[in-house]
């Protein structure tokens, strides 16, 4: 306390010295004002023009007034400051917490700040998720070049049990790991988080102590271990690793399962023990009833051990396929025979059959064909070549041991081998068609400006005088929005098309660098294996540019990629200044490019994080070899 008083007194002394200097200089420079106090009658009369006042004897013989007593003013001011500081010292809080409380009482109660979404990024793409993602321009929310994306939809976990501790031949284990990869990839593409459980999760369950392995057959024991592991993970969805989603993403059952809420323990007609959904408490009650049942040692399946009213039984789903032994024996006899004769080779056939059925389901869902958006086709054919190659790869019939077969849940499908080739169109504008899949490359405005003026140098004067604003966005929305809509309104519709649940199911949007995502990323996006893409071999000649046009456009694209990757410096060169001018002139096109780039980068980063968590389990990273 003494040190605090001493510091306050020192501050008072400094204030006193400073005040004296200021007032002293002011008094010396305005000595006349001290002689006549402000606002006095005499001062007012003296200030009046001489023609407006009468002469007086005192004017003729002015009397000297005594100098003002300035030290009295100094003393009064200093005493006032000392009194204020001593009062503050006596009542000052002793801690920072008390000081904060005192301030809050003086200015009102404190308020909690709303949570700020975490900002993320990958490479050059930066973003953060917020419910205001449909705002036309992200910089009005972020104040920088980060894109505002819709909140990332939570993926509900779906579990499958696979006992890695069982002794198996290496060839059989490798083939089963490939089937596990197909299972994980298919469910991931449908919006789930697939997780492989093992014996370790089952042994962590406290109910494991009640299990008597010696008294159970192999299949009921495996099923029971899967249920123990499932209950240990707090419930959710439990599926056999030969149960796969084969239907449109907006199917009623798949949409229900994606909500992540399962109030009742449910199984599904026609799937046997292939698919369950439920929360932890019903699962635990069913397990305790099963472990206490006398039928446990005599049953051939775990469903026989439960009381009759344990499950809610829903109708057979049309979007779920189960490749169990009976189905293979009845519908795919050659594969069943191969499994009996040579199990590793039979499992390889089964993997190819399942992958081909997943691909076939996708083609049947989008029977109208593919639309490769190509606005300004005379100048952007080279830009759209990778998208065209992807479309032709998707339209190619997959390899299959049974080319004319259909999935077990859609036996009346249109086999790829006996159907006409799916059409691939290159419209300049987007069409809102349910059964058509759209693939589009979103160019940066700098890239598009250079492509549309191949014989001119792109300069700031050329941009301002000879180009219209947002030419790419206006071209692709011309059919749906017309000509009278401004850029901010178009960008809102574009974001809905690209990032809404409906739009993401029916289209793939990407930027020109890279021209298409990595081949492996595409397989996880679609949920099935794809043949490797070669644009030169797969795209028909009538959809390719001429040799001269191709060379010019490739040169422009290569230069644009270099400029877009160049880091910003204080001494901007002409290309960077032109790029900035193009972005300022085409705000909506720039927003569309950044939004598309950030959305694709976030999807890839989300999957890579999940793969890093699951890579040590069966079917994880390292099992994707062909």
Image (tube, rainbow, N blue to C red):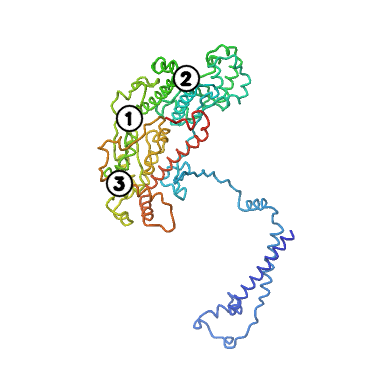
Query: SS of the residue at dot 2?
Result: strand
Between the C-alphas of marks 3 and 1, the distance is 28 Å
Q: Earlier in the sequence, mark 3 or mark 1?
A: 1
Give the camera-side residue of 21 and 169: 169
**In the current view of this chain or complex, which residue is farthest to the right?**
2
Q: Residues within 10 Å of mark 1 (few under 14, many from 20)?
A: some
Side (left or right) of 134 relative to 484? right
Vertical order, 127 against 371 (above or below):
below
Locate the C terminus by quadrant. top left
Give the camera-side residue of 557 and 82: 557
Q: Earlier in the sequence, mark 1 or mark 2?
A: 2
Residue at image mark 3: 553
Between the C-alphas of marks 2 and 3, the distance is 55 Å
Give residue 396's mark: 1
Vertical order, 440 against 572 (above or below):
above
Q: Earlier in the sequence, mark 2 or mark 3?
A: 2
Residue at image mark 2: 268
| Quarter of the view holding residue 133 | top left
Task: Name the residue rendered at 61%, 53% in the picture.
Answer: 107
Side (left or right) of 558 relative to 159? left
Query: SS of the residue at dot 3?
Result: helix
Residue 315 in the image: state x and y as whole percent: 45, 19
Q: Residues within 10 Å of mark 2 (few under 14, many from 20)?
A: some
């Amino acid at each position: 306390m003494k040190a605090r008083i001493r510091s306050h007194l020192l501050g008072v002394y400094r204030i006193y010295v400073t005040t004296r200097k200021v007032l002293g200089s002011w008094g010396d420079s305005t000595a006349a004002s001290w002689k006549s106090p402000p606002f006095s009658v005499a001062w007012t009369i003296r200030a009046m023009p001489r023609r407006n006042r009468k002469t007086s004897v005192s004017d003729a013989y002015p009397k000297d007034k005594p100098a003002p007593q300035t030290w009295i003013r100094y003393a009064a001011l200093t005493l006032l400051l000392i009194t204020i500081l001593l009062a503050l010292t006596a009542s000052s809080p002793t801690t920072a917490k008390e000081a904060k409380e005192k301030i809050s009482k003086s200015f009102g109660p404190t308020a909690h700040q709303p949570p700020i979404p975490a900002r993320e990024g990958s490479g050059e793409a930066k973003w953060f998720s917020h419910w205001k993602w449909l705002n036309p321009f992200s910089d009005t929310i972020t104040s920088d070049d980060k894109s505002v994306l819709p909140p990332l939809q939570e993926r509900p976990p779906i579990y499958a049990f696979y006992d890695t501790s069982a002794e198996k031949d290496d060839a059989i284990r490798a083939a089963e790991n490939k089937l596990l990869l197909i299972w994980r990839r298919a469910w991931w593409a449908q919006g789930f988080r697939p997780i492989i459980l093992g014996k370790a999760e089952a042994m962590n369950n406290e109910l494991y102590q009640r299990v008597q392995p010696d008294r159970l057959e192999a299949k009921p024991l495996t099923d029971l271990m899967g249920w123990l592991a499932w209950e240990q993970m707090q419930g959710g969805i439990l599926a056999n690793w030969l149960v796969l989603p084969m239907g449109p993403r907006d199917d009623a059952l798949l949409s229900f399962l994606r909500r992540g809420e399962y109030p009742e323990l449910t199984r599904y007609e026609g799937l046997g023990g292939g698919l369950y959904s439920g929360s932890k408490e019903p699962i635990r009650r069913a397990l305790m009833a099963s472990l206490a049942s006398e039928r446990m040692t005599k049953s051939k399946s775990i469903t026989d051990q439960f009381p009759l009213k344990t499950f809610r039984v829903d109708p057979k789903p049309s979007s779920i396929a189960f490749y169990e032994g009976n189905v293979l024996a009845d519908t795919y006899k050659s594969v069943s025979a191969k499994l009996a004769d040579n199990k590793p080779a039979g499992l390889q056939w089964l993997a190819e059959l399942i992958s081909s059925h997943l691909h076939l389901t996708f083609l049947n869902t989008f029977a109208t064909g593919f639309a490769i958006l190509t606005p300004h086709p005379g100048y952007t054919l080279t830009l759209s070549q990778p998208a065209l190659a992807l479309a032709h790869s998707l339209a190619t019939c997959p390899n299959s041991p049974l080319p004319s077969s259909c999935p077990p849940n859609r036996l009346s499908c249109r086999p790829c081998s006996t159907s006409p080739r799916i059409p691939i169109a290159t419209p300049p504008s987007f069409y809102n068609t349910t059964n058509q899949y759209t693939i589009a490359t979103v160019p940066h405005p700098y890239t598009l400006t250079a492509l549309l003026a191949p014989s001119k140098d792109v300069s700031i004067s050329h941009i301002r005088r000879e180009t219209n604003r947002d030419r790419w966005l206006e071209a692709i929305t011309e059919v749906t929005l017309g000509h009278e809509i401004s850029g901010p309104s178009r960008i809102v519709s574009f974001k809905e098309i690209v990032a809404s649940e409906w739009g993401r199911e029916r289209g793939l949007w990407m930027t020109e660098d890279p021209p298409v995502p990595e081949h492996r990323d595409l397989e996880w996006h679609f949920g099935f294996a794809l043949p490797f893409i070669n644009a030169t071999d797969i795209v028909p000649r009538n959809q390719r540019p001429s040799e001269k046009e191709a060379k010019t456009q490739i040169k422009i694209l290569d230069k644009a990629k270099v400029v877009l990757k160049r880091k910003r410096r204080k001494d901007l060169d002409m290309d960077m200044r032109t790029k900035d001018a193009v972005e300022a002139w085409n705000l909506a096109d720039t927003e569309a490019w950044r939004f598309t780039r950030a959305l694709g980068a976030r999807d890839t980063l989300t999957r890579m994080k999940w793969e890093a968590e699951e890579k040590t389990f069966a079917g994880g990273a390292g099992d994707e070899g062909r």
